[in-house]
Amino acid sequence: MVKRIKPFLWRYGPLLTTITIFILTYFIGSRMYPAMQKPQVFFNLFINNGSLLLVSIGMTLVILTGGIDLSVGGVLALTTAASAALLRDGASPAIVLPLMIVMGIGFGGLLGIIIQYLKVQPFIATLMGLFFARGMAYIISLTSVTITDSVYKKLALTPIYIPFFQKTYIYLPTLVAPIMLLVAIYLLFFTRFGRTIYAIGNNEQSALLMGLSVSRTKIGVYAFSGLCSALAGIVFSMSLLAGYGQFATGMELDAIASVVMGGTSLSGGVGNVIGTLFGVLINGTIVSILQFNGTLSSWWTRIGVGVLTLIAIGIQSLFHIRKNHS
Amino acid sequence: MKNISVLLKRFRESRLFWPVIAWVLILVFDAIVEPGFFELGIIDDPVYGKHLYGNLIDVFRNGAPLMLVAIGMTLVIATGGVDLSVGAVIAISAAMGAVLINPALGNELITNDILTKNATNTPLPLIILAGLAAGTLCGLWNGLLVSRARIQPMVATLILMVAGRGIAQLITNGQIMTIYYTPYFWFGNGYILGLPVSVYIVALVFVVAWVLVRRTSIGLFIESVGINSKSSFYSGINEKNVKLIAYAFCGFCAAIAGLILSSYVHSADGNNNGLNYELDAILAVVMGGTLMSGGRFSLLASVIGALVLWTFTVTIYTLGVPANALLAAKAVLVMLVIFLYSDYSRKWINRIFERKGSQHGEAN
Amino acid sequence: MTDAKDIVKMLGISKSFPGVVALDSVDFSLRRGEIHALMGENGAGKSTLIKVLTGVEQPDRGTIELDGKIVQVRSPQHSQELGISTVYQEVNLCTNISIAENIMLGREPRRFGSIHWRKMNELAQKAIDRLNIEVDVTQPLGNYSVAIQQMVAITRALEILSTRVLILDEPTSSLDIQETNLLFDVMRRLKSEGIGIIFITHFLDQVYQIADRITVLRNGRLVGTYDLCSLPRLELVAKMLGRSLTELDAMSKGKLGEEEKKGKQCLVEAKGLGRTGMLEPMDLELSANEVLGIAGLLGSGRTELAGLIFGIDAPDNGSLIVDGKKVSSFSPNESLKRGIALCPEDRKAAGVVGDLTIRENIILALQARNGWFKFLTMPKQNEIAEEYIRLLGIVTPSAEQLVKNLSGGNQQKVILARWLATNPKVLILDEPTRGIDVGAKAEIQKLVMQLAEEGKSCVFISSELEEVLRISHRVAVLRDRRKVAEYSSDVDDRTIIHTMAGEA
């Protein structure tokens, strides 16, 4: 029994580290601010960070193949701006929502094609995607557009109460992120698509020689990321009931930080979305702690996230070094 | 005649070709569409004396910070890495300057007294030194993470990028600090011999960088490490220190850029100083022909790349294109860069020029 | 040989690349249930022959027959469909996914559209049991040694495709004795199932251990195909070196034994120097005014020895003493400063910096030793570059040509120039004349002897025995990662070849 623990620890070390950091941070926070001990605070993490989580899930898959997607914030903003504008002009949510999803998938897929067939570095290609998407959002409207559609309003404001907890609730859009998390877990662990993602991240040449469809998978992950960004945009626009080109600036970097903190390596092939979940939760917890404090300014979040990322990476590299030696 | 054709051929094959062509194209476009663009006048300013004045001058003066960051970024990318933290370093160095001038933080009111005294708590040279030191230290930090701890450059510099703005805020205690010390403004607003000071600063840093990389062996080693790290190691090159110095210099350049920026806007804003500079700088370097995988680089080409980006931005503004379309226009620019530098178009262009060459019967 | 039917028959295969004839009318056949070794020194044409068989290259002339039918192997994918699988030295699998996935991915069992893990693990377990190896198929591949990874690669080849021909390209280079035996058990098992195995290697002992027949290539031509039971080792080595037994007797004696080793200053001394998994501990002395030749077939540890002396890797056994002082930190930079230079064997990965010019490549090490600030001025760089271009006869319109555009032989000369330019006390040359024309070869050999006369210590590693013998004062013989002999007195070439071949 003891013998089995050691390899288990080695294999899941980074993930356990992230989970531990989250639990510690949350624990320290709730000790410092008793108000944080209310269960609603935990669920607020999901309510407030739904978009970041969605974007990070998509980012995780891309990074697992060894790539990167800088366009996520832009696609999110574009989604909010486009939906707000369409709704304002009378389109029905039944059309707007699927349209946004298709747009996200198409956009991501296009980037994937540019990366795979034009052999452009993912960094540059998705950077262009970022400029383009956000640029389009600005063109649609330079100022914030309010959403007054009743369906959106209903979804945004109707609380769903959690059984067994007193007075704790979430909203319907909050569920989107956890559902996509499950989808991602399914894809990564139960489909050839997912296993190919891991293979490509480890050794693209080998994956090719093994006969796996590398091109299609790579284009697919970027399309998936685009899908996640579009969904994030939908959730975002529902939470704020607005569409605005300046939403989510810098979110791509928060996403990358969350993914890396969660134990996924930027070189690909190592990591999973569960770690990403905890990376996002850690991010959210720090923000919560600062809110409860009230006096410390928001920029402490930045430092906090930076320091925690550094610690997480440090511990991860320890695991890597140990692994290489054994 | 032969000499000119030889020079032209060398130019065509050099790294400067596309950036210069791009810049010329934009300028030509400006000349056609907005003839007033090139107007230069001489103005007699009460504070800064006689100096040149016009759109072109603005381009150079305001594009200076980007050009500086591009110089530093070139070296980092040439080693095969990247530095995402330059924007944050700009903010940190700006914050340092503001704080050292006027540590009257937050709670103290800015009184008329302070305004008229025009004093600083720290002598100006010390302020500059502190800012530069802070930036270089940030660069060293990045360099150590990359070369010693063997952390990937994107991740290593991401940490400072995220935490750095927080540090800048920490220094200014969360305030946007306005600077009232007029000598400080000279860097971003002053003129020497009619031309903006910032241009001279860029030229100076460029010369320093050029001497550093072309008059010592550092440039050669950077290229070697970027092209083939293993062969460089086998040849006895200390590849760790080469990377370290590249990142340190990049931080140094970002610090100077922060100085100029905060001087120009008379303030230090931890959130907005240098926002998105890293992305623009990387673009400038890529436009200058340096591959993101590392290797051969050209400082001049990167500077011109920065100039192209900046002129492009100014053009868009002067054209009256609504501000909301700037980003999309930039995207188109990046798309062009991507296509021009991709394998397909390189081969295509080479074929065109080879055919032309054989038509004219150039004997080589 | 009961069923002597040929699975593969290659007739008259010729293949040329610009400037090089890689294969010249080579015949090769593989029988069912046979382990057929393919041997030859570098440049002999082994890899080209295999590339032709697996569809990576198309032959200029000649035919390939599979089971009696003429086929055109269009691509690697096609060769796999035809039943030909290759397992390379660098295992082409993914170390982060489980062994079961590495075996089954691409044909994994599904249930309701998703991967049926339990079934996949079961099938994988059965497949790997066929090879009689004990592994946990649910563990990531990277948890296991290279030997096991190779077995998994073989298993995949057998499972996914109906493999009839298995090509193993240098499979034992990273394996120790036990792992090699494991591999051989697997090979014998497959042989008994009727699969034909092509075994490419340079390890003589292993060939005699496992193979049935052997084909020897030399300089793109077929030397012959032999039954191993009727080919003594000595003859095999002789054939690989291109000498008949009588010719060996007639080879002129080199400098061996010309000067006694008395009073020669010892510059570098290796005592029990070794590194686990790389080189067995050995003693060696490098003295001034001397050329030490290292003889041994490819893979005998020559390059590893050079790497340990030069500081590429640090030894974990024994010590290295340079100029009387024990070396405590190992790095190329330090070795350079101590006056040791290594011209490496793998010029592509460890030598040439392709996008730099000839001039830059030549002065690179010299500049590295000078440090950052003692910059060699342009006139000085040009002077040094011109000098060595002339000295070594590097063919180029100018010193500003990018090295990646030069031919292989010229690249080699540039790397050699780089190390000569540092004026070292000890110069280690690993295969310096590979790919160089005959005239230049002689020049380089003369140069090495000259350097020795001027007081340097030269270590000359080469698989061409003739040139080693011609210019060396002493010869050390390596075999299978250990030093087996050292000769300084009068010795004839037959003896050395005997030692290399492993016969007393």
Image (spheres, coloured by chain):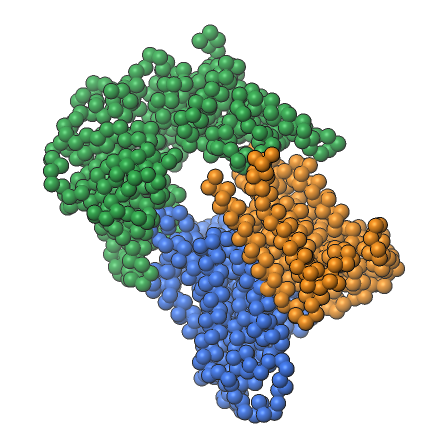
Chain colours: A orange, B blue, C green
State left or right for residue C110 relative to residue A117.
Answer: right
* Residue C10 picture location, percent across and down: 44, 20
* Up/down of C342 relative to B74, above or below: above
* Residue B180 picture location, percent across and down: 56, 85
Query: Relative to the observer, which residue lies in front, C242 or C59?
Result: C242
* Up/down of B345 relative to A5, above or below: below
Query: Relative to the observer, which residue lies in front, C42 or B194?
Result: C42
Q: Residue at x 75, y 69 (%)?
A: A143
Q: Residue at x 56, y 42 (%)?
A: A10
* Residue A262 picture location, percent across and down: 62, 50
Which of the 4 quarters of the picture holds residue C225? top left
Query: Relative to the observer, which residue lies in front, B124 or A148?
Result: B124
State left or right for residue C312 relative to residue A172.
Answer: left
Look at the image and tell me whether residue B341 can be seen. Answer: no
* Residue A236 picture location, percent across and down: 76, 59
Look at the image and tell me whether residue C1 can be seen. Answer: yes
Which of the 4 quarters of the picture holds residue A91? bottom right
Q: Residue at x 60, y 45 (%)?
A: A271
State left or right for residue B361 relative to residue B18.
Answer: left
* Up/down of C292 relative to B356, above or below: above
Q: Residue at x 17, y 35 (%)?
A: C473
